[in-house]
């Protein structure tokens, strides 16, 4: 299948037509200048979702505030500074922020905040979640204890994209002591803009749901 190329001019043309979203698929190539222009003009890239498939696991709601999808974000003390940067960046991407703490660099326990993000997503208060601690690993362990949560600890754009395309991850965990703020921004952007790919990956997610169901049934 031929690849579709989106350039800066493509974004400008869409914007001039009064459009705020550009539909893309897995074969679309987006130039760096096009991404920059889209961010400047608040134009989003929306991936085409495969629809004729059976989802056994519950589909996530898409709560919105003032028409903007809600992203829950939290951190422990190690991730506080990066959380504050990511809040601003996510808002610039056009999302509404649900800040669940912490509110300073005073020492706290990461399980409290990772669970808060997981609960916000699971209960439908948030569409996606972002949790930041020192490495991102600890928070992913906590969040993945909650049935229905698929938390991905990502350290680059590739893992962020695959976690969404293949695993339909609904929470991103980041390590403030592992990556810098600029890389974190790209990881967050990719995570929020990438849709689940469906296809063969759906069968595998349904199996994950079946495993969760086995352990949630009373003995």
Image: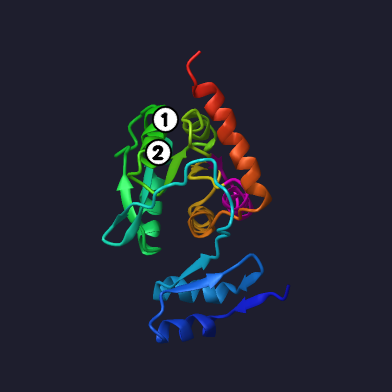
Q: Report the quarter where the N terminus lies.
A: bottom right
* Residue 202 in magenta stretch: no
Query: Is any atom of residue 218 visible in this view?
Result: yes
The answer to whether residue 72 is left or right of residue 159 is left
Which tag is nearer the camera, tag 2 or tag 1?
A: 2
Q: Which residue is mark 2?
A: 122
The span from disc 2 to disc 1 (Cα, nearest Å) is 18 Å
Point 37% across, 35% down: residue = 119
- The percent coordinates of residue 26 (x first, y second) are 64, 65
Point 38% across, 52% down: residue = 62
- Of all residues shown, which one is farthest toward the right? 1
Q: Is residue 93 above or below residue 123?
A: below
* 126 or 176: nearer the viewer: 126
Q: Is residue 60 above or below residue 197?
A: above
Point 59% across, 40% down: residue = 206
The answer to whether residue 181 is left or right of residue 94 is right
Q: Of helix, strand and loop, which one carries label 2?
A: helix
* Residue 161 in magenta stretch: yes
Q: Of helix, strand and loop, which one carries label 1?
A: helix
On residue 110, the disc is 1
- The percent coordinates of residue 56 (x first, y second) are 54, 41
What are the residue bounds of the magenta stretch? 151-167
Query: Is any atom of residue 76 visible in this view?
Result: no
The answer to whether residue 207 is left or right of residue 176 is right
* 100 or 147: nearer the viewer: 147
Quarter holding residue 111: top left
Mark 2 and mark 1 in contact? Answer it, CB < 8 Å: no
- The percent coordinates of residue 96 (x first, y second) are 32, 56
How busy is the neighbourhood of tag 2: few (under 14 within 10 Å), some, or many (20 plus)? many
- The percent coordinates of residue 145 (x first, y second) are 49, 28
Point 44% across, 41% down: residue = 131
């Amino acid at each position: 299948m031929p690849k579709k190329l989106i350039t800066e001019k493509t974004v400008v043309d869409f914007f001039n037509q009064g459009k705020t979203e550009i539909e893309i698929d897995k074969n679309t190539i987006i130039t760096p200048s096009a991404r920059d222009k889209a961010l400047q003009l608040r134009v989003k890239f929306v991936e085409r979702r495969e629809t004729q498939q059976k989802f056994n696991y519950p589909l996530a709601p898409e709560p919105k505030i003032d028409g903007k999808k809600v992203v829950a974000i939290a951190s422990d003390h190690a991730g506080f500074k990066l959380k504050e940067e990511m809040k601003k960046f996510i808002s610039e991407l056009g999302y509404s922020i649900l800040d669940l703490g912490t509110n300073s660099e005073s020492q706290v326990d990461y399980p409290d905040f990772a669970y808060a993000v997981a609960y916000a997503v699971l209960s439908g208060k948030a569409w996606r979640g972002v949790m930041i601690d020192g490495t991102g690993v600890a928070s992913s362990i906590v969040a993945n204890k909650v049935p229905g949560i698929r938390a991905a600890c990502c350290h680059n754009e590739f893992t962020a994209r695959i976690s969404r395309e293949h695993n339909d991850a609904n929470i991103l965990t980041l390590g403030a002591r592992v990556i810098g703020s600029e890389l974190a921004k790209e990881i967050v952007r990719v995570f929020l803009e990438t849709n689940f790919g469906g296809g063969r990956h759906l069968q595998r997610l349904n199996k994950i749901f079946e495993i969760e169901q086995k352990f949630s049934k009373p003995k």
